[in-house]
C-alpha cells in the first residue's frame, strides 16, 4: 500500500512513542501471530504494538476499536482514515 506523507509520518510518530514509552513484551499477538517479542504502548485512546524489528505492527483507536494500521513484513497492509482523530493525541505524547 502506498501511503501519503501524512500517513507515513503518523506511523513513524507512533513508532517513536513505542520506542520511548513502550513496554518490552514477549507475548504480543499481532495479526493473529502469537508470542511476538516487541513493544507495547497503550492508554485510553491508542494501542500501539510492534515486534522488535517493526516488521509486524498494529495501531488501534481504542474508542471505536478501529484498527488504524496493520503492518506485515514491513509493509502497511491496511490503513484507516480514522487516524485523523488520533493525530493530536500522538503529537502530545
Image (cartoon, rainbow, N blue to C red):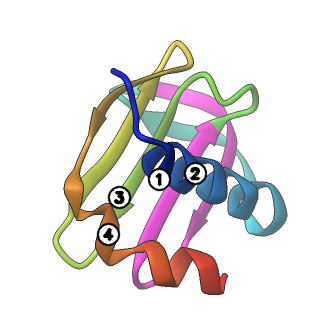
Which quadrant: the N terminus? top left
Q: Nearer the viewer, mark 3 or mark 2?
A: 2
Label 3: element kind = strand
Which residue position holds label 4? 84
Q: Is residue 77 above or below residue 70?
A: above
Label disc, if present, on residue 9 of the rendered structure: 2
- What separation in Å lies between label 2 and label 1 (alpha carbons)? 5 Å
Magenta-colored stretch includes residue 44: yes
- Badge 4, how many Cα within 10 Å: few under 14, some, many 20+? few
Query: CB atoms at circles 3 and 2 under 8 Å apart?
Result: no
Could you tell me which residue is drawn at 20 percent across and 64 percent down?
Answer: 65
Label 4: element kind = helix
Which quadrant: the C terminus? bottom right
Which residue position holds label 1? 6
Which of the 4 quarters of the picture holds residue 69?
Answer: top left
Could you tell me which residue is drawn at 39 percent across and 74 percent down?
Answer: 86
Q: Nearer the viewer, mark 4 or mark 1?
A: 1
Q: Nearer the viewer, mark 3 or mark 1?
A: 1
Residue stretch in magenta: 34-50
Which of the 4 quarters of the picture holds residue 63?
Answer: bottom left
Q: Position of residue 41 (x, y in %)?
A: 61, 64
Amino acid at each position: 500500500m502506498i501511503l501519503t506523507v501524512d500517513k507515513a509520518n503518523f506511523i513513524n510518530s507512533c513508532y517513536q512513542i513505542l520506542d520511548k514509552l513502550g513496554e518490552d513484551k514477549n507475548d504480543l499477538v499481532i495479526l493473529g501471530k502469537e508470542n511476538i517479542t516487541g513493544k507495547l504502548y497503550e492508554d485510553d485512546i491508542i494501542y500501539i504494538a510492534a515486534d522488535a524489528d517493526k516488521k509486524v505492527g498494529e495501531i488501534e483507536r481504542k474508542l471505536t476499536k478501529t484498527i488504524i494500521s496493520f503492518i506485515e513484513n514491513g509493509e502497511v497492509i491496511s490503513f484507516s482514515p480514522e487516524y485523523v482523530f488520533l493525530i493530536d493525541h500522538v503529537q502530545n505524547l
